């Protein structure tokens, strides 16, 4: 019985791994590089109406971690952090409506298989059913690997960049002025934020990236973005996968994009507290506190505000 269950789990994993790059390849087959990138800088909303411009010092786009199912129903804990950041930075616009694990911003609950993913999403909140719900994490984690793959990553990251530009337009971004943009990515969203930001920078947008416990590769986008901040907790072991599994981040690759950006001083690593990667005691936890009484959530908010402030 156990052997059958293991074989079934392996079959599902292999199927998800096979399907992971297919979506981005199909998206790419319908487009060409030059026209697609050039069309990103538009001034109309999704419905074709002219969008009103908002004067802001900075636009921030947040990409959630691998446990999310769409770009709208992020966890209340993450939304609380973003709300606090927006309140403390009134001259910044914060957007969080992009699903980074799909090429056309279609959430898992917006597909023909919504019955399946919707049930797993509900199980995420039920302790006895938490393990089957991890299939969402597996599915999205495979998209992170696609983003970091030099074969499929360029198409996938280009598609996500397009969704980010559409989000910017929805939130009043002025394409004639092109104010700075910072893309924040949590967990697997960190790698996708980095990969997509290279295309934003190619549109002459001053672009920076903030990783919250992200698993980051030596993405070519590092040759274009202005800065990368990697914020991490001392108990977060998963964020250590980046320097472990991507050889281009090793010291043996001195000419890689990561090591060149690091030597140029454009990468900043900052330990912000004793957080774990996810679950109790993670970056968004308001119950766990340091010895001085500061919640882990507030530590994360403080770190983000410091990075995003104009005096940085």
Image (tube, rainbow, N blue to C red):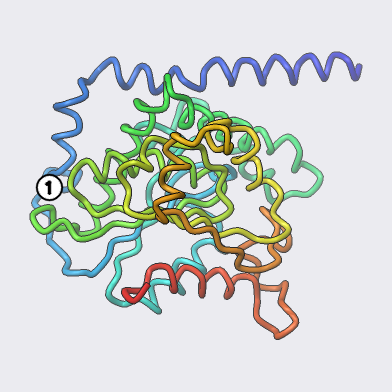
Looking at the rendering, in which quadrant would you find the N terminus?
Answer: top right
Image coordinates of residue 66 in percent, x first then y, are 57, 42
| Residue 172, percent from left and from top | 19, 59
Q: Nearer the viewer, residue 68 or 91?
A: 91
Residue ID at (42%, 56%): 265
Residue at point 53%, 61% (across, down): 78
Apparent side of residue 155 relative to residue 256 in the rendered image (left or right) = left
Q: Position of residue 27 (x, y in %)?
A: 32, 22
Lateral position of residue 54 relative to residue 145, left or right: left
Q: Secondary structure at mark 1?
A: loop
Query: Circle 1 is placed at which residue position?
Result: 44
Q: Quadrant of the C terminus?
A: bottom left
In the rendered view, tell whether residue 37 sits above or below residue 215.
above
What residue is rendered at 65% in x and 67% in y?
285
Q: Residue at x 61, y 15 (%)?
A: 15
In the rendered view, would you say 117 is above or below 65? Answer: above
Q: Residues within 10 Å of mark 1 (few under 14, many from 20)?
A: some
Q: Is residue 76 left or right of residue 96?
A: right
The image quarter containing residue 10 is top right
x, y (%) of residue 54? 17, 66
Please state the total of marks drawn on the protein image: 1
Q: Residue furthest right?
A: 1
């Amino acid at each position: 019985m156990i052997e059958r269950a293991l074989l079934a789990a392996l079959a599902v994993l292999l199927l998800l791994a096979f399907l992971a790059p297919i979506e981005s390849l199909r998206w790419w087959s319908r487009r060409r590089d030059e026209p697609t990138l050039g069309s990103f800088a538009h001034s109309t909303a999704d419905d074709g109406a002219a969008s009103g411009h908002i004067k802001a010092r900075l636009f921030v786009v947040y990409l959630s971690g691998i446990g999310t199912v769409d770009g709208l129903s992020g966890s209340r804990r993450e939304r609380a952090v973003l709300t606090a950041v927006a309140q403390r930075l009134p001259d910044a616009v914060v957007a969080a409506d992009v699903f980074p694990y799909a090429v056309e911003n279609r959430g898992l609950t917006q597909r023909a298989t919504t019955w399946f993913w919707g049930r797993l999403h509900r199980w995420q909140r039920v302790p006895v059913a938490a393990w089957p719900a991890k299939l969402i994490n597996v599915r999205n984690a495979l998209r992170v690997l696609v983003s970091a793959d030099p074969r499929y990553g360029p198409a996938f990251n280009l598609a996500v960049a397009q969704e980010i530009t559409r989000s910017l337009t929805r939130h009043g971004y002025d394409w004639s002025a092109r104010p700075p943009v910072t893309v924040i990515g949590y967990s697997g969203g960190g790698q996708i934020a980095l990969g997509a930001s290279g295309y934003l920078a190619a549109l002459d947008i001053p672009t920076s990236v903030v990783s919250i416990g992200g698993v980051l590769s030596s993405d070519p986008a590092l040759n274009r973005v202005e800065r990368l901040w990697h914020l991490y907790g001392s108990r977060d072991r998963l964020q250590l996968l980046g320097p472990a599994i991507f050889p281009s981040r090793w010291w043996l690759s001195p000419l890689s994009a990561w090591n060149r950006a690091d030597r140029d001083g454009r990468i900043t690593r900052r330990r912000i507290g004793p957080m774990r990667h996810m679950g109790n005691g993670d970056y968004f936890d308001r119950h766990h506190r340091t010895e001085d009484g500061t919640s882990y959530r507030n530590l994360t908010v403080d770190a983000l505000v410091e990075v995003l402030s104009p005096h940085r």
